[in-house]
Image (tube, rainbow, N blue to C red):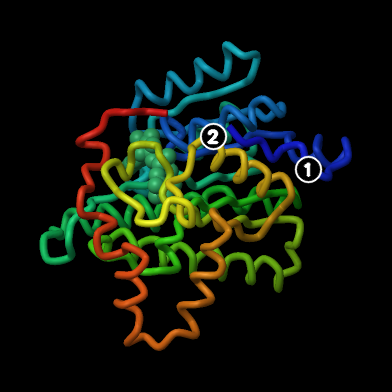
């Protein structure tokens, strides 16, 4: 496991300001959400975890409280705006104001465009995109009132670069990149600089969500270790980093995409192994691993 926490440059006052009040992390019942919740709880944050998966959610809360942390688990289907409204009001009443919102929950159908159903596409957008809108609408007013807040959107490198056989996922993630960029600009121009945004765009992470996927050049584009990814994301959050792409080569590939002619894109993708990336995808259905 890599730890980048040692390179943090925060004084005690800054750190205590960052970790006070409640955090809300969607999709905290497994994978990256659970690992982030554990890390922030260790720093003293009161964690509020939302997930549709009751067992996973309670397990995350248990892991945190057993280690002396504070966690509140709520069952919430974030694909449903009414549930988000009810759950956010319950959290405000029972736990208090949320000073940091981490939109982490995500789903992937893993189907080719031609095979995706209306239900697949709508659900993907509801979880990966619209939930980011409704949760921000629910918690941002208090952040503005308290002049303190942070919105973290866990998106994907697939929010910058289209991937073969991931049209619904990429479209939903591209939309969330746009949302996060615009929200950040709007907060800045409205003078709400005390609210930070962090846009997280990782390549594949070995959590099980993309089980079966293969990378052609693991030395260049490795499938990321979940602990490593969670450490990097935690560091980005604590240092108010606006954007995090992991591994670093993603920054270069995003830039390359803007200068290489679009007609050359399939050749670059094929060379990088993008044509076969999803060929053996089984996802969570084929792999019940929960990190
Ligand atoms: N795993 C990867 O390769 C990878 C790569 C880039 C980005 N991401 C993104 O990182 C985030 C976390 O992914 P992960 O790998 O930890 O996946 P994961 O499947 O381990 O975790 C996702 C969590 O979201 C929850 N969830 C799904 N639908 C929900 C709903 N309707 N309401 C509430 N909770 C719901 C699930 O129960 C699960 O606990 C996702 O947004 C994903 O798109 C993942």
The answer as to whether callout 2 falls within 8 Å of ligand 1 is: no
Kindly identify the residue that appears in the image at 38 percent across and 24 percent down: 56
Q: Which residue in the rendered view is the most extreme toward the top?
A: 66
Give the quarter of the image for residue 184. Answer: bottom right
Residue behind mark 1: 8
Residue behind mark 2: 227
Is 8 left, or right, of 99 in this rendering?
Answer: right
Give the quarter of the image for residue 200. Answer: bottom right
Is 78 left, or right, of 284 in this rendering?
Answer: right
Q: Is residue 137 above or below residue 6?
A: below
Kindly identify the residue that appears in the image at 62 percent across and 53 percent down: 141
Point out residue 133 in the picture as x, y percentages from the top left corner. Answer: 46, 57
* Depth check, front residue: 228 or 130: 228
Point out residue 144 in the picture as x, y percentages from the top left corner. Answer: 69, 55
Q: Secondary structure at mark 2?
A: helix
Kindly identify the residue that appears in the image at 49 percent across and 65 percent down: 177
Point out residue 38 in the picture as x, y percentages from the top left corner. Answer: 58, 27
The answer as to whether callout 1 falls within 8 Å of ligand 1 is: no
Kindly identify the residue that appears in the image at 69 percent across and 56 percent down: 241
Is 95 left, or right, of 287 in this rendering?
Answer: right
Q: Is residue 71 above or below residue 241?
A: above
């Amino acid at each position: 496991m890599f730890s980048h926490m040692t390179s943090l440059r925060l004084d005690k006052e800054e750190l205590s300001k960052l970790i006070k009040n409640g955090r809300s992390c969607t999709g905290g019942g497994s994978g990256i959400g659970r690992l982030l919740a554990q890390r922030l709880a260790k720093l003293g944050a009161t964690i509020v975890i939302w997930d549709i998966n009751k067992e996973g959610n309670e397990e995350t809360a248990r892991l945190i409280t057993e280690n002396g942390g504070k966690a509140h688990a709520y069952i919430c289907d974030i694909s449903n705006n009414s549930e988000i409204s009810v759950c956010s009001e319950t959290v405000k009443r029972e736990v208090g104001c949320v000073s940091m919102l981490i939109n982490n929950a995500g789903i992937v159908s893993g189907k080719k465009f031609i095979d995706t159903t209306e239900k697949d596409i709508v659900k993907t957008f509801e979880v990966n995109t619209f939930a980011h809108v409704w949760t921000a609408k629910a918690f941002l007013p208090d952040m503005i009132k308290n002049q303190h807040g942070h919105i973290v959107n866990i998106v994907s490198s697939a929010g910058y670069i289209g991937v073969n056989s991931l049209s619904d996922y990429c479209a939903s993630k591209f939309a969330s990149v746009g949302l996060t960029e615009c929200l950040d600009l709007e907060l800045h121009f409205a003078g709400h600089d005390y609210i930070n945004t962090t846009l997280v765009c990782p390549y594949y992470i070995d959590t099980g969500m993309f089980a079966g996927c293969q990378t052609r050049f693991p030395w260049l584009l490795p499938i990321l270790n979940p602990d490593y990814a969670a450490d990097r994301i935690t560091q980005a959050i604590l240092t108010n980093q606006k954007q995090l792409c992991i591994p670093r080569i993603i920054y270069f590939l995003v830039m390359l995409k803007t200068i290489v002619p679009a007609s050359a894109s399939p050749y670059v993708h094929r060379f990088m192994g993008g044509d076969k990336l999803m060929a053996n995808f089984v996802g969570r259905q084929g792999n019940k691993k929960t990190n």
